[in-house]
Amino acid sequence: MNHGNKQRLFINEVATRDGFQMEPHFIPTDDKIALIDQLGTLGYSKIEVTSFTSPKAIPALRDGEEVMARIARRPGVVYTALVPNLRGAERALDVRIDEFNIVMSTSETHNLSNLRMTRKQSFAQLGEVIALARSASVPVNVSLSCVFGCPMEGEVPQETVLGWIDRFAELAVKGITLCDTTGMAYPTQVQTLCQAAMTRHPQLEFTAHFHNTRAMGLVNSVAAVEAGIQRFDMSLGGIGGCPYAPGATGNVATEDVVHMLQCMGYDTGMDLDGLISAAAQVSHLVRHDLPSQLPRAGHRLTKHQPPADFPEIVARAAARQSAKGNAKEAVA
């Protein structure tokens, strides 16, 4: 395992889209905007603000246009959103989105279950979105789901994943996100696929997106870093998930992963105390406890007061030492 040596990593926040869309109640628009404005001050490279999917499909994000129009755009932060089709793309362009994030699965079964289309149909539809984005000079990132395995098909062959990356690379997209959609990835697999993808397409910006379904999110993040990945999706508090992953706890928690990477010597550019505060706000908004660990324990150098009777403990220890010394003198 390597020391980070101040290597720069770039953190993308997905809680306000991937996380909020899974919550059972609607989070008020003003609260979403206030949270995103807060996040913009914490050092993120990118924030996935919302989704331009049909409001009927994702009612929790039905206020996407208003949120995107009213947030405070911070210099250096990319404000992106999920764009599923041409209609969504047109809505996104109307509010000056910085980037289109488009999604399809490398698993045929998962794509049909999640998007109600074959992979071929998805690719054709997304090709139209990419063409519109190019005409508007908006960069496109492709989030490929289930690249580390499908809960219905099992293993997804690496060459299948690389083949879909090839197809999108031919359309001149800016980046590819390798998504562990249901938390099936493991470290050696992560390293092998990440290295193969980056070697095959060095011109693309690759991002890793891990879920913590089987408690391997942190170690998979380390594996990706050591494979050469510099960009990561994370979710405050670990909220979000996939309906096709029974028992899933959601995405890797931003504050947990950032804390780990900073301890290892990587430069994430993030305000860790600010993340802990923001996670508390997320917990308030979603009205339940979060699966992340750092807000409970604090960072590793958080200092706590010793027990209330610590002076007495010290005095008793000193008395025992003194008595032991006196006993030795008496014997001598």
Image: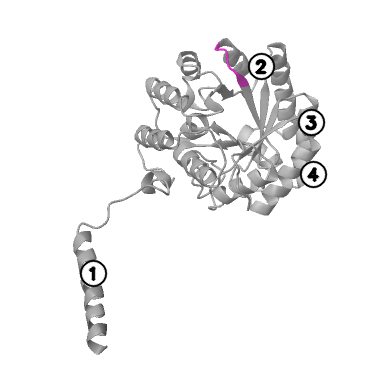
Residue 86 percent location from the top left of the image: 65, 17
**Residue matched to label 3:** 167
Q: Looking at numbered disc 3 in the image, what kind of residue is underneath it?
A: Arg
Find out whether residue 96 is within the magenta segment.
Answer: yes
In the image, 240: left or right of 199? Answer: left
Quarter of image, res 266 = top right
Magenta stretch: dominant secondary structure: loop
Task: Work out whether residue 53 can be spotted.
Answer: no
Q: Looking at numbered disc 4 in the image, what kind of residue is underneath it?
A: Glu
| Alpha carbon separation for disc pair 3 and 2 | 19 Å
- Residue 318 image label: 1
In this rendering, the label closer to the viewer, 3 or 2: 2
Task: Work out whether residue 132 can be spotted.
Answer: yes
**Residue matched to label 2:** 138
Q: Does 328 appear above or below 251?
A: below
Q: What residue span does the magenta drawing correspond to?
A: 95-99
**In what element is the residue under mark 1?**
helix
